[in-house]
Image (spheres, rainbow, N blue to C red):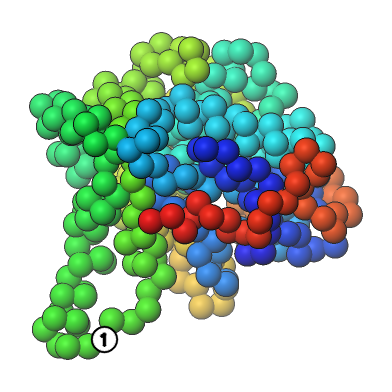
């Protein structure tokens, strides 16, 4: 999607997207992508882009593009990324001339953003800074974490943390291989059969390309994520701190829209469900009948075979949710843009220029960080 980099630091670049409608909502949306993948899965291709869809509905959209850390950035930890989110939020607020912004965060980016909101709640600035939170395939509760829990035994985790500390990062290709083997039918066996056994040329597949466009995980963030997962610290009040603030998700009282995938083997939907119920407000929970990435890349249209469940009042158990919440045909994107629009203020004429005097456009989107190998 067309846009411009309006802020660049050693940790991230901030992209502002050009409006495509005569008027836009006054409250902007800042998207926080995963910290262990490149952001463009959320702006993947024409008619398959969350950014394109939101902009077409009149939302003013900004995106963080994380730097691909190397050994010199091994010190980047949870607080580094949390501080970056706060810096990006402040820039978006300044450019849009709005005190609060809507936050939308995916996977590990959602974990970081939840920590930021807990920090803001502790400091008393949450209501002034954040209008709403959208969480995409994000597990805040790591109890019974499914397939990935096998990779996080304490002895193995200690060895992995020590190795990443020595190198300064976790190699991105190793992470990509782990995620691929969690979904062998989708990401491995079909290509073995067609390419190796039958000699067919592999078709162009944007999601597979993105999955192999690996990024590294900074040693500091790797350490903090492992400790958080082993102790399930995000949902235990006071068990971890973010920017010197004890984390208590129960103190985070903002409107939350959460999306999970019924067939997600990376973030089991039950974990996502339990996690969002920890917030101090009642979330709107959507269960898409898809996997991890397909739950995100879920555009509406006449050819869509998607469906989802959605509820504002969440039963105690996931079994009750499956039993009691009916399935709706179509894409959750339509439901979400309606929900987000109710939290985005009034419409006003779209500006013809991006950024402002303090945050001038530095380069065209997507910027340079996303190209770094």
Question: Can see residue 364?
Answer: yes
Residue 214: x and y in percent read 34, 55
Q: Quadrant of the C terminus?
A: bottom left
In this picture, is 95 found above or below 213? above
Instruction: Work out which residue is located at the far front of the displayed protein and give it.
Output: 72
Res 182 → quadrant: bottom left
Residue 16: x and y in percent read 68, 51
Is residue 23 shown left or right of residue 114?
right
Q: Residue at left 57%, top 71%?
A: 47
Q: Residue at left 14%, top 81%?
A: 196
In this picture, is 273 found above or below 173? above
Is residue 288 shown left or right of residue 265?
right
Q: Quadrant of the N terminus?
A: bottom right
In this picture, is 371 found above or below 287? below
Is residue 63 shown left or right of residue 140?
right
Question: Can see residue 270?
Answer: no
Q: Residues within 10 Å of mark 1 (few under 14, many from 20)?
A: few
Q: How many marks?
A: 1
Is label 1 in a helix, a strand or a loop? Answer: loop
In this picture, is 257 found above or below 43? above
Q: Residue at left 85%, top 62%?
A: 22
Choose between 66 and 176: the one closer to the eye: 66
Residue 276: x and y in percent read 46, 32
Choose between 97 and 319: the one closer to the eye: 97
Residue 162: x and y in percent read 18, 28
Q: Which residue is mark 1?
A: 201
Q: Residue at left 56%, top 33%?
A: 85
Is residue 206 shown left or right of residue 125?
left
Choose between 312 and 219: the one closer to the eye: 219
Choose between 75 and 110: the one closer to the eye: 75
């Amino acid at each position: 999607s067309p846009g411009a980099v309006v802020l660049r630091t050693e940790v991230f670049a901030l992209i502002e997207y050009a409006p495509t409608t005569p008027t836009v909502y006054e409250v902007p949306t800042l998207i926080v992508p995963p910290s262990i993948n490149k952001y463009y899965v959320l702006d993947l291709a024409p008619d398959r882009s969350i950014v394109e869809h939101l902009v077409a509905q009149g939302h003013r959209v900004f995106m963080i593009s994380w730097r691909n850390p190397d050994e010199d950035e091994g010190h980047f930890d949870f607080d580094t990324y949390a501080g970056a989110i706060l810096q990006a939020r402040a820039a978006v607020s300044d450019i849009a001339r709005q005190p609060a912004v809507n936050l939308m965060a995916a996977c590990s980016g959602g974990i970081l953003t939840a920590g930021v909101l807990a920090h803001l709640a502790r400091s008393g600035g949450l209501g002034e800074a954040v209008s709403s939170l959208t969480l995409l395939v994000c597990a805040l509760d790591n109890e019974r974490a499914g397939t990935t829990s096998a990779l996080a035994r304490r002895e193995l985790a200690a060895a992995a943390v020590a190795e990443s500390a020595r190198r300064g990062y976790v190699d991105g290709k190793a992470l990509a291989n782990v995620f691929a083997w969690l979904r062998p039918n989708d990401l491995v066996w079909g290509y073995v059969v067609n390419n190796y056994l039958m000699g067919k040329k592999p078709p162009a597949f944007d999601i597979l390309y993105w999955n192999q466009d690996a990024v590294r995980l900074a040693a500091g963030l790797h350490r903090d994520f492992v400790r958080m997962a082993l102790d399930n610290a995000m949902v235990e009040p006071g068990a971890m701190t973010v920017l010197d603030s004890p984390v208590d998700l129960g103190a985070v009282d903002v409107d939350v829209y959460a999306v999970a995938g019924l067939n997600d083997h990376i973030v089991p939907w039950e974990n996502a469900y339990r996690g969002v119920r920890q917030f101090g407000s009642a979330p709107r929970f959507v269960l898409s009948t898809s996997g991890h990435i397909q739950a995100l890349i879920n555009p509406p249209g006449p050819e869509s075979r998607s469906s989802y469940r959605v509820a504002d009042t969440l039963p105690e158990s996931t079994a009750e949710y499956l039993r009691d919440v009916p399935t709706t045909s179509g894409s959750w994107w339509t439901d979400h843009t309606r929900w987000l629009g109710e939290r985005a203020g009034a419409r006003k004429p779209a500006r013809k220029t991006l950024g402002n005097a303090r945050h001038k456009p530095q380069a065209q989107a997507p910027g340079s960080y996303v190209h770094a190998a």
